[in-house]
Amino acid sequence: MTLIEFVKALRPCEDLFEICMWDDVVQDCNQLFKMSYTFAGICCSFNYVLEDYIESGRPVDYDKLRTSSLFGPRSGITIVLNRDFLVEDVPEEEKYVKYSTNSVGVVMFPHHPLEYVATLATRIILQKNQELRVSITPFVKKKLSGYYEENSRGEIVPHCADEKITLQYFPSYRYSNCFTSCSINAFLQYCDCIPHYFTPIANKYSLRMCDWEDFACLYRNAKYTRIIQNTLTENYTCECITPCWDVEYELSTSYSELSGNHDFNVAHLYTFMQMTTIPIADELYLLVFMKSSTFMQMTTIPIADELYLLASLGGIFSLFLGCSFISAIEIIYFVGLYFRSSYKKSK
């Protein structure tokens, strides 16, 4: 058994979920979720299309994403996780799972559909006997392209990444994907292989994946391959700039403890659960939805463009010299009258 085959056998997606709903309608979980690769290993992802576009190499088609015109708790994705993946620490029964977070449960990574889940990805711990609601508010950031600045090496570079700037291993530019691309090159430089969680990239570009015998090299060079910011060293350079157009997601979470079956709970999910043999109090319910039908967009302009400089000069002249551009035009006008009058007198 290879390392990849072993990892795939650990957490198959078809066993992770018991019930899935989209826009308050029960659907097949296998149609909503698929296996994907992250820095934490193999995960089950919803609306994640990055790996598909890495494999196909085609331009990104956002129409393939699952979308909804609704907002609020009765919309979006709702899931009930399998209780066997939510085991608690019971040493006498030897039934427990150790996680790097020192918490027992399932980790969720909310992220952009074209963003690779890397080390600094936002994460939420899902635990047993809870209903977790995650409301999402998109926030669009836009910068004007066509402006340049000086980087740390004295080079003149764009102040933001427009659609012309591409990454070596990803179909579209994302700020975090840029650092991930740098990490891949660092792995290849130090160990001549990339870890198993970059399997789609390894298959696409015919790169060697690290196996058991490469673990020592990965551990020894971990501080060089974990790139989360711009890096400039003698052996390696990684400089990333923010995109000219980007969307971020602000998350608001709320928890409530489950206390069993109740006839007064009219939510569609709970009425559906009451018709099954699944005990409500032993489960974890996750609801992810849009908080509102609107979002904010912030446009950032350079600190000084041509119009700004012109207005600033006019303001400085007016404040310190008591004149403006209109005054300068008037001075030129009266000087012209003076020379015209002098010319006529000379005749």
Image (cartoon, rainbow, N blue to C red):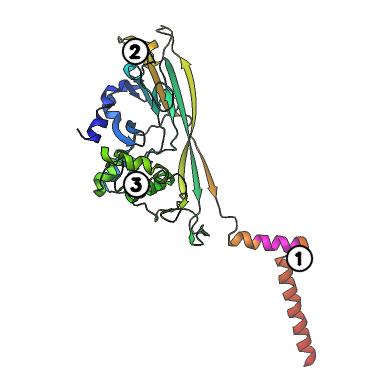
Secondary structure, mark 2, is: helix
- Which residue does the numbered mark 1 point to in the structure image? 323
**The C terminus - image quarter:** bottom right
Q: Which residue is drawn at 67% across and 60% down?
A: 312
Secondary structure, mark 3, is: helix
Residue 287's disc number: none
User: Can you name the residue that lies furthest to the left here?
Assistant: 1
Where does residue 114 sit, x and y in percent of width and height?
Answer: 37, 41
Q: Is residue 17 visible?
A: yes
Q: For marks 3 and 2, give the one nearer the viewer.
A: 3
Q: With respect to residue 241, does 96 lie above or below? A: above
- Which residue does the numbered mark 2 point to in the structure image? 273
Q: Distance between the residues labelled 3 and 2?
A: 47 Å
Q: Badge 2: few (under 14), some or many (20 or more) residues near its Cα, within 10 Å?
A: some
Q: Does the magenta stretch include residue 270?
A: no
Q: With respect to residue 113, does 291 lie above or below? A: above
Magenta highlight range:
311-318
Where does residue 7 sit, x and y in percent of width and height?
Answer: 27, 31
Q: Which residue is drawn at 34% across and 41% down?
A: 218
Q: How many marks?
A: 3
Q: Distance between the residues labelled 1 and 3?
A: 62 Å
- Which residue does the numbered mark 3 point to in the structure image? 187
